[in-house]
Image (spheres, rainbow, N blue to C red):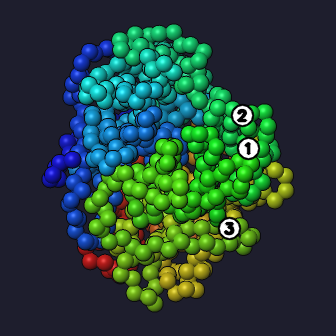
């Protein structure tokens, strides 16, 4: 690590999916380099932080949150893995990134972290560019998702070679780093994304999966345009005036010689190496095998909402685990000798707790090692420890080791040591039940120097409250920066609606049941009403100064609440808005999906529905100040709401951010959104100054 802090170099952010050059396509091109390959001129490395620098003791501002060093994907799941553990368990590898709003760019780095021996992390290469991800859904691909596309990282079986991907506007690359020779070389380049990466069992070949026929599908769309496009489910009018490629473009498994980069035959045994889940029992969420012992977690009964149960087979003999601790298991590992099973589960209200257990099947009951409200994910077994990414409500993402003996945690990497010196607001976990008895939870954040008895304006941020309280789902509402400016902030975790009668067998049936009578939306609104009432009774908030915010599903919660209650005096939406015309402009594929779960199919049949679901059709909606901060790929969905409410005298304004997907990625845009949201809320809710320097 450098002895002094250095300003990182930067790379330009670019977007794949919205600014396509479909004419420049072609077959897969492989580039093999012998020796050390120079990093692309388009990329710049981040620097690791100086652990000896002590930050200024002050309130948290928006720049502190935007410039956090991140690794892994933006979510809190296991796929793609946020890091890769070497087979010899000596190193963890990850891609680090850091945003700079001033240059609207990111720096990146491939970092190796010694797991044992107390060595310092070090950088082996840049990590390519930060590219906005696309998604495949509703029968099409290339949908503008917007989240940063993380690198795929894979160790060879001997632990000497590390393969990793780099993303660029026009290609994806596979690189290999040699830990002994201390050199990195580019193995291949592809005009399409690499979507899976692994090694063959013998370590001589790189296995990967890509939609290699996607360029041809894009070329076919360009050719079709010469005679006019037939309007159908391929269109996504929100973001493009051209059809999108079909989701049927297959994911093709391929194999490369790890030394030369030449294409090799893909063998039957490679399937399991590249796609481990193919060997899992049906409907399993996790699986582990050691010799003749297998363990997995899967629903005990059919149905989308059926809890998963731990199941074990010792040879041909099933061995059930009947304790409560064996439900909700999300990850599991056998010990090296195959005697002990370690597993991770989520439990508590809204699965707000993470727990780890050790169990010797057939000899005792599972022994709990750790129970915490911290979020631990991407975990991998390392013998006497389990290595995990970790987030706490007031602590950004870390890499930690958990003892398999007693659950004690050990820090391996803190990418943001400066953050610990800042002064966060006080966080309090709340749990409550709504009018129907449905359990909910959230985290209340108060200014660090809050004076008891002083009622604060409340800002509700949605719709998950697990892990680091940064900016809510979509990361647009800076929770700690808001608290530093004198707001009480509730990070609200959306409760899961539960059917009271028939158990739905699939997602579509579940959604249809949840839409009947707006049961799900009314449950969520009841939960919000109850917690606002509770905070009012405690004397913490002013119930006449409550704002609701939301992105995606959170925006639907917000507009439903505005249409069906008078709880809120201001609202900010990152996605807008559900209405009949909003579905029309979204295209046939999304329209068909919504009709399939219970939305009206025609204007004539839809009037009663939209009087409840749509803000512009609700007869009793009370005008409140409304700010919309929309992506260029989605703002058209909100035009009808904006026009109608503005003509009716609502105080409404809308900002549109170019080159953005469902989640906004440009650092300059994120800074503008953070700062505008705070300034706007101050103008509407008038908080008193809370913490100097906030």
- Relative to 337, say whether 483 is above or below: below
Can you identify the residue that label 1 sits on?
A: 311
248 left or right of 126 in image? right
Image mark count: 3
Contact, mark 2 vs mark 1 (Cβ under 8 Å) = yes
Q: For the residue labelled by badge 1, is the local secondary structure a helix, a strand or a loop?
A: strand
**Mark 2 or mark 1: which comes first in sequence?**
2
263 left or right of 35 in image? right
Can you identify the residue that label 2 sits on?
A: 281
Q: For the residue labelled by badge 3, is the local secondary structure a helix, a strand or a loop?
A: strand
Can you identify the residue that label 3 sits on?
A: 439
Residue 355, image quadrant: bottom right
- Relative to 605, say whether 200 is above or below: above
Given residues 272 and 493, the one toward you in this image is 272
Given residues 57 and 213, the one toward you in this image is 57
Given residues 162 and 587, the one toward you in this image is 162
């Amino acid at each position: 690590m450098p002895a002094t802090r250095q300003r990182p170099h930067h790379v330009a952010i670019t977007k794949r999916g919205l600014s396509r050059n479909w004419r420049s396509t072609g077959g897969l091109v492989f580039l093999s380099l012998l020796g050390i390959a120079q990093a692309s001129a388009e990329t710049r490395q981040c620097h690791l932080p100086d652990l000896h620098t002590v930050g200024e003791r002050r309130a948290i501002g928006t720049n502190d949150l935007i410039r956090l060093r991140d690794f892994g994907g933006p979510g809190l799941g296991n796929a793609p893995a946020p890091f890769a553990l070497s087979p010899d368990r000596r190193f963890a590898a990850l891609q680090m990134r850091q945003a700079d709003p001033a240059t609207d760019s990111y720096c990146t780095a491939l970092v190796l972290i010694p797991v044992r021996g107390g060595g310092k992390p070090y950088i082996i290469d840049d990590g390519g560019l930060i590219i906005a991800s696309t998604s495949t859904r509703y029968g099409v691909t290339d949908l503008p998702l917007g989240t940063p596309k993380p690198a795929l990282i894979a160790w060879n079986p001997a632990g000497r070679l590390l393969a990793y991907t780099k993303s660029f506007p026009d290609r994806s690359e596979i690189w290999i780093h040699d830990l002994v020779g201390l050199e990195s070389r580019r193995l291949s380049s592809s005009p399409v994304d690499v979507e899976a990466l692994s090694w063959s069992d013998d370590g001589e070949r790189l296995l990967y999966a890509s939609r290699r026929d996607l360029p041809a599908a894009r070329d076919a769309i360009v050719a079709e345009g010469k005679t006019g496009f037939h309007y159908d489910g391929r269109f996504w009018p929100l973001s493009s005036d051209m059809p999108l490629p079909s989701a049927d473009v297959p994911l093709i498994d391929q194999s490369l010689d790890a030394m030369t980069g030449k294409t090799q035959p893909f063998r039957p045994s490679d399937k399991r190496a590249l796609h481990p889940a193919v060997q899992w029992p049906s409907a399993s969420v996790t699986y582990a095998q050691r010799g003749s012992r297998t363990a997995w977690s899967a629903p005990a009964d059919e149905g989308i909402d059926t809890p998963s149960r731990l199941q074990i087979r010792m040879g041909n003999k099933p061995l059930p685990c009947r304790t409560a601790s064996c439900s909700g298991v999300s990850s599991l590992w056998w010990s090296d000798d195959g005697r002990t099973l370690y597993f991770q589960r989520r439990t508590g209200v809204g699965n707000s707790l993470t727990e780890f257990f050790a169990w010797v099947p057939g000899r005792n009951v599972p022994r709990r090692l750790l129970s915490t409200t911290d979020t631990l994910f991407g975990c991998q077994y390392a013998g006497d420890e389990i290595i995990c990414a970790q987030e706490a409500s007031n602590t950004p993402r870390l890499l930690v080791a958990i003892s398999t003996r007693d659950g004690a945690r050990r820090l391996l990497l803190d990418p943001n040591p400066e953050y610990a010196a800042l002064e966060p607001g006080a966080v309090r976990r709340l749990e409550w039940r709504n009018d129907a008895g449905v359990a909910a939870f959230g985290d209340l954040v108060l200014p660090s120097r809050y004076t008891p008895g002083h009622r604060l304006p409340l800002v509700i941020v949605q719709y998950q409250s697990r892990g680091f309280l940064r900016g809510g789902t979509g990361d647009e509402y800076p929770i700690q920066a808001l608290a530093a400016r004198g707001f009480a902030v509730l990070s609200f975790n959306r409760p899961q609606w539960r059917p009271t009668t028939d158990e739905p067998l699939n997602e579509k049936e579940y959604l249809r049941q949840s839409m009947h009578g707006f049961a799900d939306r009314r449950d969520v609104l009841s939960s919000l009403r109850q917690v606002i009432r509770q905070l009012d009774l405690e004397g913490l908030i002013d119930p006449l100064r409550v704002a609701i915010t939301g992105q995606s599903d959170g925006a639907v919660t917000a507009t439903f609440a505005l249409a069906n209650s008078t709880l809120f005096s201001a609202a900010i939406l990152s996605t807008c808005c559900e209405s009949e015309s909003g579905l029309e402009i979204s295209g046939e594929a999304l329209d068909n999906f919504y009709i399939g779960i219970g939305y009206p199919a025609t204007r004539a049949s839809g009037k009663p529905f939209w009087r409840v679901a749509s803000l512009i059709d609700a007869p009793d909606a009370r005008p409140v100040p409304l700010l919309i901060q929309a992506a260029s790929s989605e703002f058209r969905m909100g035009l009808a709401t904006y026009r109608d409410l503005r003509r009716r005298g609502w105080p409404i304004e809308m900002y549109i951010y170019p080159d953005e997907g469902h989640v906004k990625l440009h650092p300059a845009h994120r800074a503008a959104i953070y700062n505008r949201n705070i300034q706007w809320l101050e103008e509407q809710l008038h908080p008193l100054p809370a913490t100097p320097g906030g």
